[in-house]
Amino acid sequence: MQTWNPEQYATHARFVSDLGQPLLELLAPRAGERVLDVGCGDGALTERLVAAGCRVVGIDNSAAQVRAARARGIDARVADAAALDFDREFDAVFSNAVLHWITRPDAVLAGIRRALAPGGRLVAELGGHGCVAAVREALGIALDRRGIDAEGCDPWYFPTAAEYRARLEEHGFAVDTIELFPRATRLPSDLTDWLQTFAQPFLAAVPAPERPAVCAEVRRRLEPQLRGGDGTWVADYVRLRVAARNLRRAACDAGASSERRPPTRPPGRGAAARGGAR
Ligand SMILES: C[S@@+](CC[C@H](N)C(=O)[O-])C[C@H]1O[C@@H](n2cnc3c(N)ncnc32)[C@H](O)[C@@H]1O
Protein backbone atom coordinates (compact mmCIF):
# COMPACT_ATOMS: atom_id res chain seq x y z
CA MET A 1 0.00 0.00 0.00
CA GLN A 2 1.40 3.36 -1.04
CA THR A 3 0.69 6.46 1.03
CA TRP A 4 1.79 10.04 0.44
CA ASN A 5 3.06 12.34 3.13
CA PRO A 6 3.42 15.94 1.90
CA GLU A 7 6.37 16.72 4.22
CA GLN A 8 8.25 13.61 3.11
CA TYR A 9 7.32 14.44 -0.47
CA ALA A 10 8.65 17.98 -0.20
CA THR A 11 11.95 16.76 1.27
CA HIS A 12 12.66 13.71 -0.85
CA ALA A 13 10.54 14.09 -3.98
CA ARG A 14 10.44 17.77 -4.88
CA PHE A 15 12.44 16.90 -8.00
CA VAL A 16 9.24 15.34 -9.40
CA SER A 17 7.41 18.65 -9.76
CA ASP A 18 10.65 20.56 -10.47
CA LEU A 19 11.24 18.33 -13.48
CA GLY A 20 7.69 18.97 -14.71
CA GLN A 21 8.55 22.28 -16.37
CA PRO A 22 9.06 20.81 -19.89
CA LEU A 23 5.63 19.19 -19.61
CA LEU A 24 4.09 22.52 -18.73
CA GLU A 25 5.78 24.00 -21.78
CA LEU A 26 4.35 21.21 -23.92
CA LEU A 27 0.89 22.07 -22.59
CA ALA A 28 1.47 25.78 -23.33
CA PRO A 29 -1.40 26.83 -21.04
CA ARG A 30 -3.39 29.89 -22.05
CA ALA A 31 -4.99 32.30 -19.64
CA GLY A 32 -8.64 31.47 -19.02
CA GLU A 33 -8.36 27.82 -20.04
CA ARG A 34 -10.03 25.24 -17.82
CA VAL A 35 -7.41 22.68 -16.84
CA LEU A 36 -7.77 19.48 -14.83
CA ASP A 37 -4.56 18.37 -13.09
CA VAL A 38 -4.89 14.62 -12.56
CA GLY A 39 -2.87 13.57 -9.52
CA CYS A 40 -2.02 17.11 -8.48
CA GLY A 41 -0.09 15.94 -5.41
CA ASP A 42 0.80 18.81 -3.09
CA GLY A 43 0.04 21.30 -5.86
CA ALA A 44 3.56 22.64 -6.47
CA LEU A 45 3.20 22.18 -10.23
CA THR A 46 -0.52 22.95 -10.26
CA GLU A 47 0.35 26.35 -8.85
CA ARG A 48 2.22 27.15 -12.07
CA LEU A 49 -0.94 26.49 -14.08
CA VAL A 50 -2.81 28.89 -11.84
CA ALA A 51 0.00 31.44 -12.28
CA ALA A 52 -0.46 31.09 -16.06
CA GLY A 53 -4.04 32.31 -15.62
CA CYS A 54 -5.79 28.96 -16.03
CA ARG A 55 -8.92 27.96 -14.13
CA VAL A 56 -7.56 24.84 -12.51
CA VAL A 57 -9.11 21.91 -10.68
CA GLY A 58 -6.71 19.38 -9.16
CA ILE A 59 -7.68 15.89 -8.15
CA ASP A 60 -5.69 13.38 -6.16
CA ASN A 61 -6.70 10.31 -4.18
CA SER A 62 -4.45 11.20 -1.26
CA ALA A 63 -6.36 13.34 1.26
CA ALA A 64 -3.05 14.53 2.74
CA GLN A 65 -1.74 15.71 -0.63
CA VAL A 66 -5.07 17.42 -1.36
CA ARG A 67 -4.88 19.26 1.95
CA ALA A 68 -1.37 20.46 1.06
CA ALA A 69 -2.58 21.60 -2.37
CA ARG A 70 -5.53 23.44 -0.85
CA ALA A 71 -3.13 25.19 1.52
CA ARG A 72 -1.62 26.72 -1.64
CA GLY A 73 -5.06 28.03 -2.57
CA ILE A 74 -5.71 25.40 -5.22
CA ASP A 75 -9.17 24.01 -5.92
CA ALA A 76 -8.08 20.46 -5.10
CA ARG A 77 -10.40 17.54 -4.50
CA VAL A 78 -10.02 13.96 -3.38
CA ALA A 79 -10.93 11.70 -6.28
CA ASP A 80 -9.68 8.55 -7.97
CA ALA A 81 -8.21 9.15 -11.41
CA ALA A 82 -9.63 5.80 -12.47
CA ALA A 83 -13.18 6.96 -11.67
CA LEU A 84 -13.33 10.54 -12.94
CA ASP A 85 -16.81 11.94 -13.25
CA PHE A 86 -16.34 15.18 -15.13
CA ASP A 87 -18.24 15.73 -18.34
CA ARG A 88 -16.59 17.87 -21.07
CA GLU A 89 -15.64 20.46 -18.51
CA PHE A 90 -11.99 21.04 -19.39
CA ASP A 91 -9.98 22.44 -22.28
CA ALA A 92 -6.98 20.42 -21.15
CA VAL A 93 -6.03 17.60 -18.84
CA PHE A 94 -2.53 17.72 -17.41
CA SER A 95 -0.82 14.99 -15.43
CA ASN A 96 2.74 14.64 -14.20
CA ALA A 97 4.17 11.47 -12.67
CA VAL A 98 0.84 9.90 -11.78
CA LEU A 99 -0.53 7.58 -14.45
CA HIS A 100 2.06 4.83 -13.86
CA TRP A 101 0.67 4.49 -10.33
CA ILE A 102 -2.65 3.30 -11.69
CA THR A 103 -2.91 -0.21 -13.09
CA ARG A 104 -6.28 0.46 -14.76
CA PRO A 105 -5.14 2.64 -17.68
CA ASP A 106 -8.34 2.15 -19.66
CA ALA A 107 -10.49 3.45 -16.82
CA VAL A 108 -8.19 6.46 -16.50
CA LEU A 109 -8.19 7.27 -20.22
CA ALA A 110 -11.96 6.86 -20.52
CA GLY A 111 -12.48 9.30 -17.64
CA ILE A 112 -9.96 11.79 -19.03
CA ARG A 113 -11.63 11.73 -22.40
CA ARG A 114 -15.05 12.29 -20.84
CA ALA A 115 -13.63 15.20 -18.86
CA LEU A 116 -12.35 16.93 -21.99
CA ALA A 117 -14.30 19.28 -24.21
CA PRO A 118 -14.26 18.30 -27.90
CA GLY A 119 -10.78 18.97 -29.25
CA GLY A 120 -9.44 19.31 -25.71
CA ARG A 121 -5.90 18.14 -25.14
CA LEU A 122 -4.21 15.67 -22.85
CA VAL A 123 -0.62 16.41 -21.89
CA ALA A 124 0.87 13.85 -19.56
CA GLU A 125 4.11 12.33 -18.44
CA LEU A 126 4.40 8.99 -16.69
CA GLY A 127 6.98 6.37 -16.01
CA GLY A 128 7.60 4.41 -19.19
CA HIS A 129 8.83 0.94 -20.10
CA GLY A 130 12.08 0.18 -18.26
CA CYS A 131 11.61 2.87 -15.61
CA VAL A 132 13.69 2.24 -12.47
CA ALA A 133 14.50 -1.22 -13.85
CA ALA A 134 17.64 -1.57 -11.74
CA VAL A 135 15.79 -0.61 -8.56
CA ARG A 136 12.95 -2.98 -9.33
CA GLU A 137 15.37 -5.80 -10.01
CA ALA A 138 17.21 -5.21 -6.74
CA LEU A 139 13.93 -5.11 -4.82
CA GLY A 140 12.89 -8.31 -6.59
CA ILE A 141 16.06 -10.10 -5.53
CA ALA A 142 15.73 -8.91 -1.91
CA LEU A 143 12.11 -10.05 -1.70
CA ASP A 144 12.78 -13.29 -3.54
CA ARG A 145 15.42 -14.18 -0.94
CA ARG A 146 12.63 -13.89 1.63
CA GLY A 147 10.24 -16.06 -0.36
CA ILE A 148 8.10 -13.12 -1.53
CA ASP A 149 6.96 -12.64 -5.11
CA ALA A 150 7.93 -9.03 -5.91
CA GLU A 151 5.75 -8.95 -9.02
CA GLY A 152 2.72 -9.35 -6.79
CA CYS A 153 3.61 -6.14 -4.90
CA ASP A 154 4.73 -4.07 -7.89
CA PRO A 155 2.42 -1.04 -8.02
CA TRP A 156 3.64 0.37 -11.31
CA TYR A 157 2.39 0.35 -14.88
CA PHE A 158 5.23 1.34 -17.21
CA PRO A 159 3.97 1.05 -20.81
CA THR A 160 5.89 1.26 -24.06
CA ALA A 161 5.13 4.14 -26.43
CA ALA A 162 3.47 1.75 -28.90
CA GLU A 163 1.20 0.27 -26.25
CA TYR A 164 0.17 3.64 -24.87
CA ARG A 165 -0.42 5.12 -28.31
CA ALA A 166 -2.71 2.20 -29.15
CA ARG A 167 -4.66 2.71 -25.92
CA LEU A 168 -5.00 6.43 -26.55
CA GLU A 169 -6.27 5.81 -30.06
CA GLU A 170 -8.73 3.19 -28.83
CA HIS A 171 -10.11 5.82 -26.46
CA GLY A 172 -10.63 8.34 -29.24
CA PHE A 173 -7.50 10.45 -28.94
CA ALA A 174 -5.34 11.70 -31.80
CA VAL A 175 -1.75 11.42 -30.66
CA ASP A 176 0.32 14.48 -31.54
CA THR A 177 3.53 13.34 -29.86
CA ILE A 178 4.55 10.39 -27.76
CA GLU A 179 8.11 9.95 -26.64
CA LEU A 180 9.86 7.40 -24.43
CA PHE A 181 13.19 8.63 -23.11
CA PRO A 182 15.64 7.80 -20.34
CA ARG A 183 15.93 10.48 -17.69
CA ALA A 184 18.67 9.67 -15.22
CA THR A 185 17.44 11.49 -12.12
CA ARG A 186 19.64 12.85 -9.37
CA LEU A 187 18.04 12.14 -6.02
CA PRO A 188 18.12 14.85 -3.36
CA SER A 189 18.86 12.33 -0.60
CA ASP A 190 19.78 8.74 0.02
CA LEU A 191 18.34 5.85 -1.96
CA THR A 192 16.76 4.62 1.28
CA ASP A 193 14.67 7.81 1.41
CA TRP A 194 13.58 7.20 -2.17
CA LEU A 195 12.60 3.62 -1.29
CA GLN A 196 10.63 4.78 1.73
CA THR A 197 8.90 7.48 -0.32
CA PHE A 198 8.14 5.57 -3.51
CA ALA A 199 8.56 1.83 -2.97
CA GLN A 200 6.25 1.30 -0.02
CA PRO A 201 4.26 -1.56 -1.62
CA PHE A 202 7.46 -3.64 -1.89
CA LEU A 203 8.60 -2.81 1.65
CA ALA A 204 5.14 -3.48 3.06
CA ALA A 205 5.45 -7.08 1.87
CA VAL A 206 8.02 -7.81 4.59
CA PRO A 207 7.45 -7.49 8.33
CA ALA A 208 8.31 -4.02 9.64
CA PRO A 209 11.43 -5.08 11.59
CA GLU A 210 12.87 -6.62 8.39
CA ARG A 211 12.43 -3.50 6.22
CA PRO A 212 15.70 -1.74 7.13
CA ALA A 213 17.58 -4.89 6.12
CA VAL A 214 15.78 -4.95 2.76
CA CYS A 215 16.64 -1.29 2.15
CA ALA A 216 20.27 -1.88 3.14
CA GLU A 217 20.51 -4.85 0.81
CA VAL A 218 18.98 -2.98 -2.14
CA ARG A 219 21.24 -0.02 -1.44
CA ARG A 220 24.36 -2.23 -1.34
CA ARG A 221 23.45 -3.93 -4.58
CA LEU A 222 22.77 -0.66 -6.43
CA GLU A 223 25.60 1.46 -5.08
CA PRO A 224 28.15 0.55 -7.77
CA GLN A 225 25.57 1.23 -10.49
CA LEU A 226 23.57 4.23 -9.26
CA ARG A 227 25.85 6.16 -6.91
CA GLY A 228 28.31 8.65 -8.29
CA GLY A 229 31.78 9.46 -6.97
CA ASP A 230 30.37 12.52 -5.17
CA GLY A 231 27.97 10.30 -3.22
CA THR A 232 24.86 11.38 -5.16
CA TRP A 233 22.33 8.72 -6.10
CA VAL A 234 21.03 8.80 -9.67
CA ALA A 235 17.91 6.72 -10.33
CA ASP A 236 17.36 5.08 -13.72
CA TYR A 237 14.08 6.81 -14.60
CA VAL A 238 12.50 6.38 -18.03
CA ARG A 239 9.65 8.75 -18.97
CA LEU A 240 6.80 8.53 -21.42
CA ARG A 241 5.64 11.99 -22.49
CA VAL A 242 2.41 12.38 -24.41
CA ALA A 243 0.43 15.12 -26.11
CA ALA A 244 -2.93 14.05 -27.56
CA ARG A 245 -6.27 15.56 -28.52
CA ASN A 246 -9.79 14.40 -27.90
CA LEU A 247 -11.06 13.69 -31.40
CA ARG A 248 -14.71 13.97 -30.44
CA ARG A 249 -16.46 16.77 -32.29
CA ALA A 250 -19.35 18.63 -30.75
CA ALA A 251 -21.49 18.30 -33.89
CA CYS A 252 -21.15 14.49 -33.98
CA ASP A 253 -22.04 14.09 -30.35
CA ALA A 254 -25.12 16.25 -30.50
CA GLY A 255 -27.05 13.22 -31.72
CA ALA A 256 -25.57 10.74 -29.25
CA SER A 257 -28.01 10.79 -26.37
CA SER A 258 -25.90 8.65 -24.06
CA GLU A 259 -23.10 11.20 -24.25
CA ARG A 260 -25.19 14.32 -24.49
CA ARG A 261 -23.89 17.22 -22.50
CA PRO A 262 -26.04 18.23 -19.54
CA PRO A 263 -27.66 21.63 -20.14
CA THR A 264 -25.51 23.56 -17.72
CA ARG A 265 -23.02 22.51 -15.15
CA PRO A 266 -20.27 24.79 -13.92
CA PRO A 267 -16.74 23.35 -14.15
CA GLY A 268 -15.94 20.75 -11.53
CA ARG A 269 -19.39 20.06 -10.11
CA GLY A 270 -19.33 16.35 -11.04
CA ALA A 271 -19.99 13.49 -8.64
CA ALA A 272 -16.25 12.88 -8.21
CA ALA A 273 -15.86 16.45 -7.18
CA ARG A 274 -18.78 16.24 -4.77
CA GLY A 275 -17.27 13.05 -3.32
CA GLY A 276 -13.98 14.86 -2.87
CA ALA A 277 -15.56 17.69 -0.96
CA ARG A 278 -16.97 15.36 1.66
C1 LIG B 1 4.66 11.24 -7.73
S1 LIG B 1 3.24 12.09 -7.20
C2 LIG B 1 3.08 13.38 -8.44
C3 LIG B 1 2.33 14.57 -7.91
C4 LIG B 1 2.33 15.81 -8.80
N1 LIG B 1 1.67 15.58 -10.05
C5 LIG B 1 3.72 16.33 -9.01
O1 LIG B 1 4.14 16.48 -10.17
O2 LIG B 1 4.40 16.62 -8.01
C6 LIG B 1 1.95 10.97 -7.61
C7 LIG B 1 0.59 11.43 -7.13
O3 LIG B 1 -0.38 10.59 -7.74
C8 LIG B 1 -1.44 10.42 -6.83
N2 LIG B 1 -2.21 9.24 -7.23
C9 LIG B 1 -1.80 7.96 -7.27
N3 LIG B 1 -2.80 7.15 -7.64
C10 LIG B 1 -3.88 7.94 -7.85
C11 LIG B 1 -5.23 7.72 -8.25
N4 LIG B 1 -5.68 6.47 -8.51
N5 LIG B 1 -6.05 8.76 -8.35
C12 LIG B 1 -5.64 10.01 -8.08
N6 LIG B 1 -4.37 10.30 -7.69
C13 LIG B 1 -3.50 9.27 -7.59
C14 LIG B 1 -0.74 10.29 -5.50
O4 LIG B 1 -1.61 10.50 -4.42
C15 LIG B 1 0.37 11.31 -5.61
O5 LIG B 1 0.00 12.56 -5.08
Image (spheres, rainbow, N blue to C red):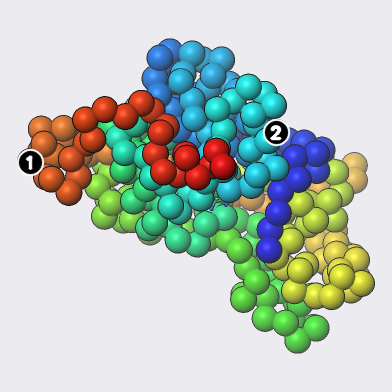
Q: Is residue 265 left or right of residue 48?
A: left
Q: Residue 203, image x and y in percent? A: 78, 67
Please report the residue visible at 83 percent of the width from the left and 51 percent of the height from the top: 193
Please report the residue visible at 51 percent of the width from the left and 15 percent of the height from the top: 52
Going by the picture, which residue comes out furthest to the front? 278
Q: Which amino acid does the dot numbered 2 rest on?
A: Ala
Q: Secondary structure at mark 1?
A: loop
In the rendered view, would you say 130 is above or below 178?
below
The verdict on label 2 being within 8 Å of ligand 1 is: no
Q: Residues within 10 Å of mark 2 (few under 14, many from 20)?
A: some
- Quadrant of the rendering where the N terminus is positioned: bottom right
Please report the residue visible at 92 percent of the width from the left and 72 percent of the height from the top: 209
Q: Is residue 228 left or right of residue 127?
A: right
Please report the residue visible at 11 percent of the width from the left and 45 percent of the height from the top: 256
Q: Which mark is residue 68?
A: 2
Q: Which amino acid does the dot numbered 1 rest on?
A: Gly
